[in-house]
């Protein structure tokens, strides 16, 4: 017997779609090319899976059509997924900015999804390769030819769901296969690039980052009229950490990053006030009270070598203004990002204009659905991309 629904990809979106469709009585087959399901879930959040966020809005997503995500997010909310998590007795915790993580392990989420799929009768096959997709002769469904355990198989279905993910982290199964299917059926693609990804630098900036590797601090970073205030991490390649990953979604080659090392105060006023109240304190000593000494040493050498060893009362107000400007407007020009190898998401993808926002079905191809990261939808860091997977998967599962 051929299944009613075939889903390509057993990640977050694919599994959510599968269990939702099967609970409606649809027979569902999921084909996964790797050796296990939910690989990206398992590695996310440091193995704890940041599975959603309390504060999900359309503004947390990047899409060529900013209204596209609204319907799915409204039809399946973070509260809906939290209810499922609680039904399975999974313990979770809230962290900064409304982020929800498993207290124990990301395996709890995968186990929950598989349990729901199993109870609803979903059939999941791993190690499936070389999938070829064609419409049936009657255009009433789709025919798939694939290899499973070195055996060539053919299956037909009424509804085909593309949940193959995108290009990010190829070691976890990222590929362009979903885009190839979209092209085959004439769907428009938005240019793809790595998102939520660390930056790399060259020259003296790279050397500085290497020397500070492992140091993290809270900063504000700005680029292209966007800003984020979270931690930044120096690495041996450049810069990472939540703030940097967030701003990478808005950076383009050649753009500058503007780093504010004092996101909560006016550094100029602080320096002048301290000069009046503690005139004998050295500039380096003062800065080292609020910033890591290693960072202050690097900044002094880079920008204020003539002020090293100087008391505040020996430094002109105009010079202190320049120090404050550098502290709050440190301009850095990345050479590149680390690319898809470490990117958490892929920006761009199957254009939302060709997809129904209510059902995730291709407007010109009955029974062909696209969900999750393969679409031109990318969320901010903090559980938003998983919520898009749950929401888009659920919406498609209700309609296949």
Image (tube, rainbow, N blue to C red):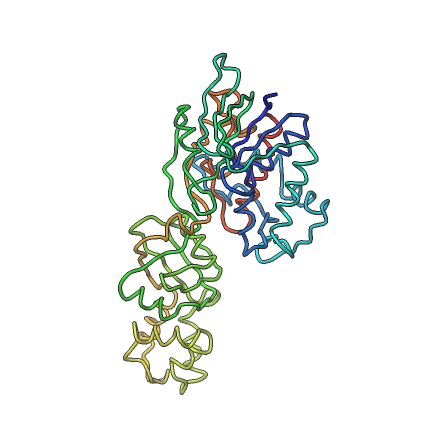
Give the vertical position of 61 relative to 325 (above or below).
Answer: above
Residue 147 in percent (x, y) is at 48, 31
Quarter of the picture containing the N terminus is: top right
Quarter of the picture containing the C terminus is: top right
The front one of 250 and 216 is 216
Give the vertical position of 274 relative to 170 (above or below).
Answer: below
Q: Tell me the quarter of the picture where residue 183 sits.
A: top left
Give the vertical position of 179 relative to 287 (above or below).
Answer: above
Give the vertical position of 386 relative to 293 (above or below).
Answer: above
For the image, the number of numbered tags is 0
The front one of 340 and 294 is 340
Q: Tell me the quarter of the picture where residue 78 sits.
A: top right
Residue 25 in percent (x, y) is at 68, 26
Left or right, 361 with reference to 252: right
Residue 242 in percent (x, y) is at 48, 57
Please identify the residue farthest to the bottom as the structure is shown.
Answer: 280
The front one of 165 and 192 is 165
The front one of 125 and 375 is 125
Residue visible at 48% across and 29% down in the picture: 146
Please identify the residue farthest to the front as the structure is shown.
Answer: 150
Left or right, 247 with reference to 391: left
Residue visible at 55% across and 47% down in the picture: 41
Residue 359 in percent (x, y) is at 56, 28
Q: Tell me the quarter of the picture where residue 282 sits.
A: bottom left
């Amino acid at each position: 017997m051929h299944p009613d629904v075939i889903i390509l990809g057993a990640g977050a979106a694919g599994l959510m779609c599968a269990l939702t469709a099967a609970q409606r009585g649809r027979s569902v087959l999921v084909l996964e090319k790797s050796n296990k399901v939910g690989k990206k879930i398992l590695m996310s959040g440091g193995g704890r899976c940041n599975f959603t966020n309390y504060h999900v809005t359309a503004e947390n997503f990047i899409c060529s059509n900013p209204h596209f995500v609204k319907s799915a997010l409204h039809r399946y909310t973070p509260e809906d997924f939290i209810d499922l998590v609680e039904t399975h007795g999974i313990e979770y915790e809230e962290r900064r900015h409304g982020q929800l993580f498993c207290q124990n392990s990301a395996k709890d989420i995968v186990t929950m999804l598989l349990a729901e799929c199993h109870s609803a009768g979903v059939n999941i096959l791993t190690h499936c390769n070389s999938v070829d997709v064609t419409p049936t002769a009657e255009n009433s469904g789709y025919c798939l030819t694939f290899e499973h355990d070195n055996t060539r198989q053919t299956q037909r279905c009424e509804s085909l769901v593309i949940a193959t993910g995108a290009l990010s982290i190829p070691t976890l199964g990222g590929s362009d296969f979903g885009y190839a299917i979209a092209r085959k059926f004439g769907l428009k693609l938005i240019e793809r690039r790595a998102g939520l990804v660390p930056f790399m630098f060259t020259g003296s900036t790279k050397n500085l980052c290497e020397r500070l590797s492992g140091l993290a601090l809270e900063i504000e970073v700005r680029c292209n009229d966007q800003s984020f205030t979270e931690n930044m991490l120096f690495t041996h390649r450049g810069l990472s950490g939540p703030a940097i990953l967030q701003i990478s979604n808005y950076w383009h080659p050649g753009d500058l990053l503007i780093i504010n090392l004092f996101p909560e105060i006016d550094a100029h006023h602080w320096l002048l006030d301290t000069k009046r109240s503690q005139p004998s304190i050295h500039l380096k000593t003062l800065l080292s009270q609020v910033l890591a000494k290693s960072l202050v040493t690097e900044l002094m050498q880079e920008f204020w070598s003539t002020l090293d060893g100087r008391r505040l009362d020996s430094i002109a107000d105009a010079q202190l203004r320049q120090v404050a400007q550098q502290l709050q407007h440190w301009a850095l020009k990345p050479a590149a990002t680390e690319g898809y190898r470490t990117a958490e998401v892929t920006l761009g993808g199957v254009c939302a204009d060709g997809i129904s926002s209510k059902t995730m079905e291709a407007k010109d191809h009955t029974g062909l659905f696209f969900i999750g990261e393969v679409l031109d939808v990318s969320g901010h860091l903090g559980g938003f991309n998983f919520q898009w997977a749950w929401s888009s998967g659920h919406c498609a599962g209700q309609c296949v």
